[in-house]
Image (cartoon, rainbow, N blue to C red):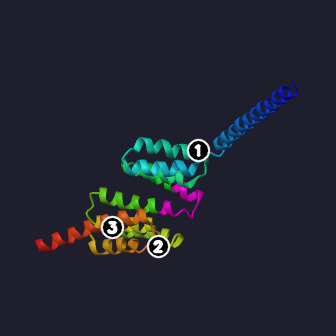
Amino acid sequence: SNKLCERKFFTLQIITLIFFNCVFILSSSSCMRKAKFAQSPFNNPGYHYSLGIQQLENGDIDAANESFTRAKALKHDYALADVGLALAALAQKEFKSAERHITLALRQDRKCFQAHIAAGKLKMLVGLDSKNVEESWIQDSLKSFNQALKISKNDPEILYAIGEAYLASGNLKDSQDAFKLILDSNNEFWSIKARKRLKFTQKQSQFLFLVV
């Protein structure tokens, strides 16, 4: 009888312990879910900007616009949000809209080198779209890119933009030099892109050599 009572008491203790452990685990997981929601890495301006850039790379301009707009809604004075909106506008040749967003971005942060890159791209695309065959736009673009380099020295994103601008102007040598500088960096993403463009420019050089 005593042993039976002891067994029942022991069983009751185990059940009680399990119950409280379950309550603790559930409450802990609930707190973790709340913490993750409150500090979600997917609901901040930086994430939406990066997502928008990736969407632009994939050619989904509408989705990119939504991401950049979301970034701006989360932080109204977030310069990169306006940079993203400018790049999306450039992809659609909406030059006035792009210029407006670049101006806003630089007003919010003069040291935002991405805004200077966007400014250089704007000058390049306006120049290429112009009926004027003169290539004076390349110097204007380089001024913006060099301004970006003053803020972020040897940044591969800036060097890539410079390489693209030289390539668009037909200057293969300087384009190749810019892409080669990126290969010296430790940035795998931009190195892969630069290597592809470098191969393209080298093929163009070989073709021109054969034609001449």
Residue 158 occupies quadrant: bottom left
Q: Main secondary structure of the magenta part?
A: helix
Upstream in sequence: badge 3 or badge 1: 1
Q: CA distance from mark 3 to mark 1?
A: 33 Å
Residue at the location (71% across, 38% down)?
Answer: 25
Name the residue that disc number 1 marks.
43
Per the image, label 2 sits on a secondary structure element best described as loop
Magenta-colored stretch includes residue 23: no
Q: Nearer the viewer, residue 33 or 88?
A: 33
* Gap in angstroms between the C-alphas marked 2 and 1: 31 Å
Does the magenta run of residues contain 112? yes
Q: Are marks 3 and 2 in contact (CB under 8 Å)?
A: no
Q: Secondary structure at mark 3?
A: helix
Mark 2 or mark 1, which has the lower sequence index? Answer: 1
Q: Amino acid at mark 2?
A: Asn
Q: Which residue is rendered at x = 66% and y = 43% of the image?
A: 38
Residue 34 in the image, given as x and y percentages of width and height:
68, 39
Circle 3 is placed at which residue position? 195
In primary-sequence order, the first of circles 3 and 2 is: 2
Q: Amino acid at mark 3?
A: Arg
* Residue located 37% across and 70% down the image: 139
In this view, 15 is above or below 147 = above
Residue furthest left as drawn: 211
Mark 2 = which residue? 154
Q: Quadrant of the N terminus?
A: top right
Q: Which mark is residue 193?
A: none
Which residue: 54% across, 70% down? 151
Start and end of the magenta stretch? Answer: 103-116
Q: Nearer the viewer, residue 30 or 134?
A: 30
**Can the viewer see residue 100 in this picture?**
no
